[in-house]
Amino acid sequence: MGVFFLKNQTLAADSESYFTKVQTVRDSFFATELNLNQHNNKKTFELRRISFNPVRRWEEWRYTGIVVDKEFVVKNCSIYANKEIEKRIYLIRAFDCDHLSFRFEKQVDTLTLVPGMTDEKEELFYRAKNSENKIVLLVISVNENHILAWGRNSRYIKKSDSAAFYSIKEERIISSIELKEAVDISAEFIKGKTNPIVSDFIIVERKVSKGILD
């Protein structure tokens, strides 16, 4: 799968976002989001991993730090959790992790992390082109009742925003999709005639005002 481009979209040069596909292990699953930022020539990163386990339920691990040459050097680590992802998650643990670092290899539309965020030998990320008025989320769960998507920018989504889903298999936007609710790190969408599958992307176009009085 290559990088996908959205019509009339502009991407700030100082910000990049990537997602892995959803990985399933027995009755659990996880996915990872990588965000890169640059400010005053200082490059920083944030790694977020969402995971579901029948016992621990929902957890999100967050690693933040700086980019040094071809390495992500970790400075802070924390874990957020809640039994229900549709609600706000809360900090349950922060721990010392400045001994951690990850090598990365960046291609045009992908990035490989070596080793992976936890036990993987490596992780492959696909670039998602966010912008000021477009947010990209990863579909992490689909059942008969809902479509659940995840991403750090979920909290900025409003009911008035429009959304569509992008098929990884077909590498194109397939259909519009209706938002039910967005809270903190997740967004729930209403199932329609045509629906995304796990690891597809949902693209939300925000209505951004031009100024205070607009």
Image: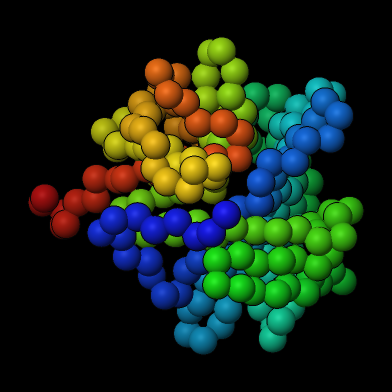
Nearest to the observer: residue 54 or residue 115: 115
Total numbered labels placed on residues in the image: 0
Residue 117, image quadrant = bottom right
Measured as percent of width and height from the top left, residue 82 is found at 69, 30
In the image, what residue occupies the spot 58% across and 24% down? 142
Measured as percent of width and height from the top left, residue 3 is found at 50, 60
Seen in the image, is 8 located left or right of residue 119?
left
Residue 138, image quadrant = top right
Seen in the image, is 214 located left or right of residue 199?
left
In the image, what residue occupies the spot 42% across and 46% down? 172
Measured as percent of width and height from the top left, residue 57 is found at 76, 27
Q: Residue furthest top?
A: 144
Q: Residue furthest front?
A: 170
Nearest to the observer: residue 202 or residue 197: 197
In the image, what residue occupies the spot 66% across and 51% down? 20
Q: How did the renderer colour the structure?
A: rainbow
Seen in the image, is 19 located left or right of residue 183?
right
In the image, what residue occupies the spot 47% across and 85% down? 40
Nearest to the observer: residue 26 or residue 79: 26
Quadrant location, the N terminus: bottom right
Measured as percent of width and height from the top left, residue 112 is found at 71, 66
Seen in the image, is 44 located left or right of residue 76?
left
Q: Is residue 195 visible?
A: yes
Relative vertical location of residue 197 with respect to residue 125 in this rendering, above or below: above
Q: Is residue 185 visible?
A: no
Relative vertical location of residue 37 with respect to residue 3 in this rendering, above or below: below
